[in-house]
Amino acid sequence: MTETPSTGQPPEFPRPTAGPPEPTRPAAGPPETPRPTAGPSQPTRPTAGPPEPSGRSSARPSQPSPRSSGASPAPDSQSSPGPSGRSSARPSLFTPAPGAAPVGRMLLAQTLFEIRLLLRNGEQLLLTAAIPVVLLWLLTAAPVFDTGDYERVDFLVPGILALCVMSTAFTSLAIATAYERRYGALKRLAASPLPRWTLLLAKALTVLVVEALQVVLVGGLGLALGWRPSGSPLAVIVLLVAGTLAFAGLGLLMAGTLRAEATLAAANLVYLLLLVLGGVVIPLSGFPSGVRTVLELTPTGALADGLRSVLADGAGLPWGSVAVLAVWAVAGLAAAARWFRWD
Amino acid sequence: MPPCDTRGMSTAPAVEITSLVKRYDAVTAVDGLSLRVAAGTLTAVLGPNGAGKTTTVEICEGFRRPDAGSVRVLGLDPWRDGAGLRPRVGVMLQEGAGFYPGARPVELLSHLARLHADPLDVPMLVARLGLESVARGRTPLRRLSGGERQRIAFAAALVGRPELVFLDEPTAGLDPQARRATWQLLDELRAAGVTVVLTTHLIDEAERLADQVVIIDAGRVLAEGTPQELTSGVSDDVIRFGGPPRLDVASLRAALPDGSSVKEVAPGSYEVAAVVDPRLLATLTSWCAANDILAEGLQVGHRSLEDVYLELIGAAAERTAP
C-alpha cells in the first residue's frame, strides 16, 4: 500500500550506511555498535533536513496518487461508448436526469411485467391452466363421482371455475408474492418510483387478466363438451370478483407473513384440500350435514355453490355465497394490510 | 472534490443526518449518529458487521422509520416524502437483493427503466457494465451467480439516472476484476455529478474511492474526513519490516532517536514508529546489519487507513469491553 514513498528513498540510505556498519560487524555487540551510527545521525539531522521535507512532501501527496492513477484507466476502458471524461463539464452517460414515469405508464408496465412472468412460469401454469382443463375433461369423460341431478359437465364447469379463481387469486398469487418478497423484489420496488397502491393494483389486474383467460379456456372446453350455461353473466362476474378478493386477501396474508418455502407448501396444501373438499368436483351433498355446513363456509365451497346455482340452476345472485365471500375478503385483506411484511 | 462544484449543487448537502437513533427491541442499532454528505461527492461508510451501516442507509432510503433524530435526503424526509424522493434516488440493496426470481436480467432492468421519466438506454448500460454475456442468455436471475446478480443490482440502481445513489456493499463478493470495474464506474458517477453513498468493509476501497470516509461502530461515528485527513496527523510515520521472530526490540529502540517506538506486531513482523528520515533508515539498517538480520519487505510509509480503522475499532471495543 505504502510502497510508493519508499521507492524514492533507497538511493539515499545506502550512502550513509555503507561505511559505518561494515567495520562494526566483527564487533557484533548488538546494543553498542549501532549507537555510533545513531549518534552521528542526530548532529547530521540538519543536513538530512533538506531532503526530509522533499521526501515528505513527495510522500504525503502520493497518498491520493493511487486514487488518481487508479481512476486514470477509466477513460481508456470506456473509450468505446463515449469519452465521458472525468470533468463534470463534459456530459456523461450518468449525468443525472431523475424523474418518475407517469403513473398510468407505470401501472401498465408493472401489470404487463407481472403477466409475462406469470405466463412463463411452468409450475404456475400447471396450477392455473393444466389442472383445471385436465380435470374438467377427464371427469366429464369418466363418471368418477356421482354428480346428483346435474349433467356431469353442468356440475363440473362451475366447480372448475371456482378452482380457477382459487388457483390464480390464492395459490399462484401467494407463491409468486412470497418469492418476490424473499428475493427482495418487493423491497427494491418499494425504493422505485412505483407507488405501493399501483403495485397492488397491478397485481389485482394481473389476477383478473389470468382469470379471464381461464374463463375462456374452461368455458370454451365446457361448451365443446356440451355445457349449457344459464343464469345472468353479471351474477357470475360478481361472484368471481368476490371470490377473487376473498382468495387474494388470504394469499397475500400468507405470502406476507410466512417464509417463501412455507407459503409454497401451505398454499399447495390448501389448494389440494379445497379441490377435494370445496365442492369443486365432489358434490358437498355427499358429506354429513355438519361437515357440509363447514365446507360451504370455505371460500371455495361458497364460490362453487354460488356459481353452480347461477350457471346450472339459473338462479339469481346467491346472496348467501356472496356474503360468505365478502366476510372472507374483508377479514383476509384487513389481516394482510395489518401483518404483511414487505421484506 | 473537483467535479460538480461547477454546477452549484454543492451548497445544500445531499444527505444530512442529525443525532439519528434506531432501536430494534433491546438492540440500539444506530445510536446518535450524525453525518453530512456534500452533493456530488462520494462518501464511504466504513465499519464492522453490525455497526449500523445498513440500518442507517435504509433509513435514508425510507425503508425504516427513525426512533429519534432527523434525516434529510435531498432536503426531504425519506419516511414522509418518499414519493418525491424515490424517483431521484438509486438504491442497491445488500447482497444484490431485489430481483424478480423468474425475470431475466435485461427484463428487470428494462422494467425498472420504464418506471422512470428519462432512463438510461438499457443495452448501453449493460454494455458499459460489461454484462453482455450475462444479459444475452435467457437465464432467470435466480440462477445467476451472486456476483452477477450483484452487478445487475448495481445497474438497476443507475438505470433511472438518479442524482443520488445508496449502494450497500456494492463490491462484496465480487472477483477482483469486477471490483475494479465497479470502482471505475463509481469514479465515473462522481465525475458525472452523482452523489454516491456506499457502505463497505473494504478499507482500500474507501481509501481509494471516497472523498469522505465515515468510520462507524456500534451505531456511532468514530471518525470522519478525507482519507488523507484520517491518515495524517494522527501519529508519526512508520517503517515496517520483517525478520526473525523475537528480535530484541528494546535494543533496536535504544539505537533509535528519542520518541521512537518499536513493536513486534506479529511474530517476525516489526513496526518502527518514529520521525522517518534517511538517517533513521540508516540507523535501522545498520542495527540490522550489526545483528546480522536481513530486513525483509522493508516499507517506509505513513499509517494506512487500515491502521487508523483498526486502531479506532479496537479502541472502541476496549472501551465497551470492561
Image (cartoon, rainbow, N blue to C red):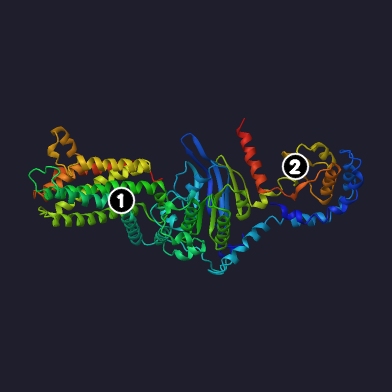
In this rendering, the label closer to the viewer, 2 or 1: 1
B220 and A335: which is toward the camera: A335
Determine which residue is flagged by label 2.
B270
> Where is residue B131 drawn, in percent x and y?
49, 60
**Secondary-structure class at tag 1:** helix
Q: Is residue B314 above or below residue B43?
A: above
> Where is residue A272 drawn, in percent x and y?
25, 42
Determine which residue is flagged by label 1.
A124
**In which image quadrant can residue A321 be found?**
top left
A326 and A113: which is toward the camera: A113
Q: Residue at x 36, y 46 (%)?
A: A178
Any part of residue A87 in sight: no
Amino acid type, callout 1: Gln
Chain bearing mark 2: B
**In which image quadrant can residue A265 be found?**
top left
Q: Dots 2 and 1: beta carbons under 8 Å?
A: no
Q: Residues within 10 Å of mark 2 (few under 14, many from 20)?
A: many
Q: How many marks?
A: 2
Q: Mark 2 vs mark 1: same chain?
A: no
Q: Is residue B214 above or below residue B119?
A: above
Image quadrant occupied by the C terminus of chain B: top right
**Which circle marks residue A238 in the picture?**
none
**Secondary-structure class at tag 2:** strand
Chain bearing mark 1: A
A137 and A325: which is toward the camera: A137
> Where is residue B300 drawn, in percent x and y?
75, 50
Amino acid type, callout 2: Tyr
A25 and B28: which is toward the camera: A25
Any part of residue B284 in sight: yes
